[in-house]
Amino acid sequence: QVQLVESGGGLAQAGGSLRLSCAASGRTFSRYPMGWFRQAPGKERECVAAISWNGGSTYYTDSVKGRFTISRDNAKNTVYLQMNNLKLDDTAVYYCAAGATLGLIAIGASVDYWGKGTLVTVSS
């Protein structure tokens, strides 16, 4: 069992930055590829970034490439999402997830665990 708790959401101005954290419980955290998803009002949930179990491989959706960075610290059971140059369209609830493989997480498949989400609001 892995429990995921997100933090770091809040209000930011367009062009600003936020850093999301996802703290995981359970000794098996380091075995899991991890992902960050987001869901904006009226839109489907999408994977914005994912990272392999050892951090060696990453995935980003096109709209966040060059602005967001996913990383993890297995010693701290934590995965991060650094979000820079925020845009109004980044406003959403952001969820942390653990799944089977990086590739499957990227398409939203085979996600074994979800956090409850943290709200990010970007204002002009």
Image (tube, rainbow, N blue to C red):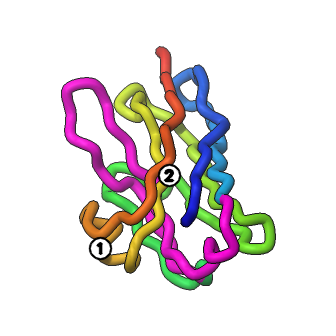
- Please name the residue shown 34% across and 68% down the image: 105
Residue 62 location, quadrant: bottom left
Q: Is residue 36 magenta?
A: yes
| Residue 78 to residue 87: above or below | below
Classed neighbour count for the residue bearing mark 1: other residues with Cα under 10 Å, few (<14), some (14–19), many (≥20): some
Where does the image place residue 86, in percent across and percent down from the top left?
50, 35
The segment highlighted magenta reads 25-53
Which circle marks residue 83 in the picture?
Answer: none
Q: Residue at x 48, y 57 (%)?
A: 66
Question: Which mark is drawn over residue 96?
Answer: 2
In the image, taking residue 51 as reference, residue 76 lies left or right, namely: right
Q: Quadrant of the N terminus?
A: bottom right
For the view shown, which residue lies furthest in the right direction?
Answer: 75
- Determine if the magenta segment contains residue 118: no
Give the labeled residue for mark 1: 104
In terms of sequence position, does the residue under pointer 1 or pointer 2 come before the other? 2
